[in-house]
Image: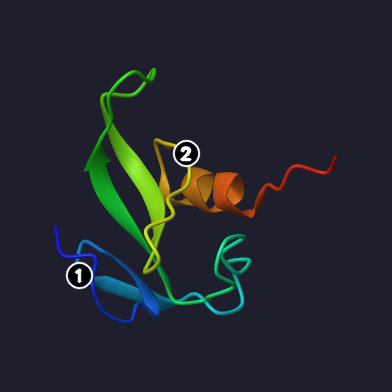
Amino acid sequence: MDLIGSFCCIQMSEKRIEVKDYFLPCPFCGDSDLEIIESLFEDTELDYGLTVYCSCGAQGPAAKTEDEALLKWNSRFKG
């Protein structure tokens, strides 16, 4: 999968949704250009799932649905 470039939309099953109002910016680089992609995971309860990726290489936790991926990405540790 090509993760290089500017991501502005969710693209799943030929459907595009603008994400600026849905995703929090990346906690590592501050970028808002994100995408939800299908991915394989090792050492998780999901072998295959969806995750949010940032162009800096950050990724969110594995999820079963787009909504779950979005909610997990937007969850932030408040220490």
Numbered tag placed on residue 42 in the rendering: none
- Residue 74: image quadrant is bottom right
Amino acid type for the residue under numbered disc 1: Glu
Q: Is residue 21 left or right of residue 8?
A: right
Q: Against 45, is 16 above or below?
A: below
Dot 1, how many residues are within 10 Å of its Cα: few (below 14), some (14-19), or many (20+)?
Answer: few
Say which label, 1 or 2, has the lower sequence index: 1
Q: Secondary structure at mark 2?
A: loop
Q: Does residue 79 appear left or right of residue 14 in this picture?
A: right
Question: Distance from label 1 to label 2 (Cα)?
Answer: 23 Å
- Please identify, in this view, whether the residue under mark 1 or under mark 2 is nearer the observer: 2
Q: Quadrant of the N terminus?
A: bottom left
Label 2 packing within 10 angstroms: few (<14), some (14-19), many (20+): some
Proximity of marks 1 and 2: CB atoms separated by less than 8 Å: no
Q: Where is residue 52 drawn, in percent x and y?
A: 42, 54
Whole-percent x, y for residue 11 in the image: 29, 68
Residue 26 shown left or right of residue 66 in the figure = right
Instruction: Provide the residue designation for mark 2.
Output: 61
Q: Residue sitting at 35 percent across and 77 percent down?
A: 7
Q: Residue at x 25, y 48 (%)?
A: 38
In the picture shown, does residue 65 fall above or below 7?
A: above
* Circle 2: residue type: Pro
Q: Which residue is mark 1?
A: 14
From the viewer's perspective, is 57 left or right of 28?
left
Q: Point out the image quarter for the C terminus.
A: top right
Q: Residue farthest to the right?
A: 79
Residue at the location (33% across, 82% down)?
A: 6
Q: Position of residue 42 (x, y in %)?
A: 27, 24
